[in-house]
Image (spheres, helix red, strand yellow):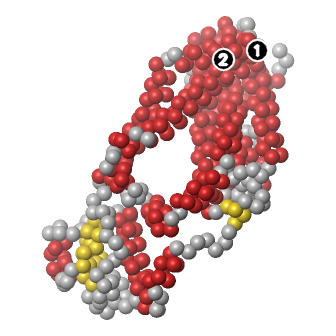
């Protein structure tokens, strides 16, 4: 145990004391925050008011198409088409809409729209949404549907109330939050396995080239060396990851102070049409209470604890395999790439299963992926977000954790034996067949 801690301490300090560690740990969140702040700034500043002149010859809109705002406004004019074209060329407005005198609400006629310049998809979506909504209201009013009845239709609640097997009521907001949390958690572990697994492999390759490992291997057992190396680098990764989370989320609170005026405008600046519709739905139907209710139904302490466990378990399991590859190859990175394919395939396969597990957490494929050690770190996070026992049963969760622990102990033991032979092997291009022989040969 002392030798494992000594190796882990060496691996930890050799990386933490480097300037590159401080630059990547602190500099990367600052760069991300700078890009994020720039996106907000240009998103708000670059959005100008789009003015549309309306020539309503049939007086179908009665001088109003929704409520004008800073993004889009409609101005009604009494002018013919030739005068509208002249004003458009003079840039008095950005586009004009002509409602023919023969236009009726039966949908047989079309409206004529012309813009001065090419329009983006978002602007086109905004105009279509405003006009279509206004026409829909006019059609319903023509059928003797009152304004109060129209408002009641917009504010209708869900007719079907869903509940889980445990009897807890689940609204669409809770399901959506579980979907997002599961997808983000699984994707984060996917990225972590690649980043820190590759870090372990490169560290082993550097030691092999510098011949440092030859001195260490003479006094430490393969399993102790492998456990110490993975633990040390894993501690670096965990600390770095926690610092990133604190910095990234902490810097978010600085945005209102950096952009005091822009943040108020930001509430009305959608990034995509779907986001615009969601924001409008929240504003119109008062879904903030529903959002708070959905967040309260998600077991974030359980998700956080499982995330840390599966992050460490997945890291230990795959890092030992990455280290085994690093010990077998020489200076040529192409040799490592050819050997990494069998290791990367389960990770990619886990991502494929995760996309199904977030939608159907109790499918046979999702259950298998969450229990199988090579895919469970990613897939289980997609299922655990739906809760216990609705998304994952206690038996499945315990089985998954036990198998993951046994899996990384087995891979670490086998990788240690490969490491002991491979770290001393020079001038020969390794293959998986030879590495398997090294793993099962008697010492």
Callout 2 touching callout 1 (CB < 8 Å): no
**Which residue is at a point 47% across and 92% down the rendered structure image?**
143
Which quadrant, please, contains the N terminus?
top right
Q: Residue 248 location in percent, x, y? A: 48, 37
Query: In the picture shown, does residue 86 fall above or below 365?
Result: below
Q: Nearer the viewer, residue 361 or 346?
A: 361
Query: How many numbered circles does the render carry?
Result: 2
Can residue 209 be seen at all in this image of the molecule?
A: no
Q: Which comes before the other along the chain, label 2 or label 1?
A: 1
Q: Which mark is residue 151?
A: none
In the rendered structure, the answer to whether residue 13 lies left or right of residue 375 reads left
- In this rendering, the answer to whether 224 lies above or below 336 is above
Q: Label 2 to label 1, Cα distance in Å?
A: 11 Å
Count neighbours of disc 2 (C-alpha within 10 A) and say few if under 14, some if 14 to 19, many if 20 or more: many
Q: Which residue is mark 2?
A: 8
Q: Position of residue 202 (x, y in %)?
A: 58, 23
Which residue corresponds to the image point at 58% horizontal and 27% vertical from the top-left?
239
**At x 52% / y 78%, what residue is drawn?**
153
Instruction: Name which quarter of the figure residue 169 lies in.
Output: bottom right
Badge 1: how crowded within 10 Å, few (<14), some, or many (20+)? few
- Determine whether the residue tagged by mark 2 lies in a helix, strand or loop: helix
Q: Which mark is residue 1?
A: 1
Which residue is most to the right? 442
């Amino acid at each position: 145990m002392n030798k494992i801690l000594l190796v882990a301490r060496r691996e930890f300090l050799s990386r933490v004391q480097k300037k590159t560690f401080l630059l990547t740990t602190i500099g990367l969140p600052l760069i991300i925050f700078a890009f994020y702040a720039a996106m907000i700034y240009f998103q708000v500043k670059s959005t100008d008011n789009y003015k549309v002149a309306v020539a309503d010859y049939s007086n179908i809109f009665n001088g109003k198409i929704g409520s004008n705002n800073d993004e889009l406004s409609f101005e009604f004019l009494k002018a013919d088409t030739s005068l509208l074209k002249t004003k458009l060329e003079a840039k008095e407005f950005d586009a004009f809409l002509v409602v023919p005198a023969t236009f009726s609400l039966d949908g047989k006629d079309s409206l004529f729209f012309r813009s001065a310049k090419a329009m983006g998809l978002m602007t086109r979506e905004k105009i279509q949404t405003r006009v279509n909504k206004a026409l829909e209201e006019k059609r319903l009013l023509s059928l003797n549907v009152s304004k109060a009845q129209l408002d009641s239709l917009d504010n209708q609640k869900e007719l079907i109330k869903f509940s889980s097997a445990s009897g807890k009521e689940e609204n669409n907001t809770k399901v959506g939050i579980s979907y997002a949390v599961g997808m983000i958690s699984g994707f984060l572990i996917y990225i972590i396995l690649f980043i820190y697994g590759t870090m372990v492999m490169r560290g082993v390759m550097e030691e092999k080239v510098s011949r440092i490992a030859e001195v260490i291997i003479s006094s430490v057992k393969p399993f102790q060396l492998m456990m110490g190396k993975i633990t040390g680098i894993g501690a670096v990764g965990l600390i770095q990851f926690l610092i990133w989370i604190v910095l990234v989320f902490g810097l978010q609170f600085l945005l209102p102070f950096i952009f005091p005026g822009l943040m108020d405008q930001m509430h009305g600046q959608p990034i995509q049409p779907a986001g615009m519709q969601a924001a409008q739905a929240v504003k119109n139907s008062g879904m903030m209470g529903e959002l708070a209710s959905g967040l309260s139904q998600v077991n974030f302490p359980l998700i956080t604890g499982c995330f840390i466990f599966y992050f460490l378990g997945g890291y230990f399991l795959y890092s030992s395999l990455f280290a085994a590859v690093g010990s077998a190859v020489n200076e040529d990175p192409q040799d490592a790439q050819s050997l990494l394919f069998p290791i990367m395939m389960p990770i990619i396969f886990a991502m494929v299963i995760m996309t199904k597990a977030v939608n159907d957490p109790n499918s046979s494929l999702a259950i298998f992926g969450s229990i199988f050690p090579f895919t469970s770190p990613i897939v289980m996070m997609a299922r655990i977000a739906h809760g216990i026992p609705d998304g994952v049963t206690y038996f499945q969760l315990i089985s998954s954790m036990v198998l993951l622990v046994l899996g990384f102990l087995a891979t670490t033991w086998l990788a240690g034996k490969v490491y002991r032979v491979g770290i001393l092997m020079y001038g020969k291009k390794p293959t998986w067949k030879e590495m398997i022989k090294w793993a099962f040969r008697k010492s």
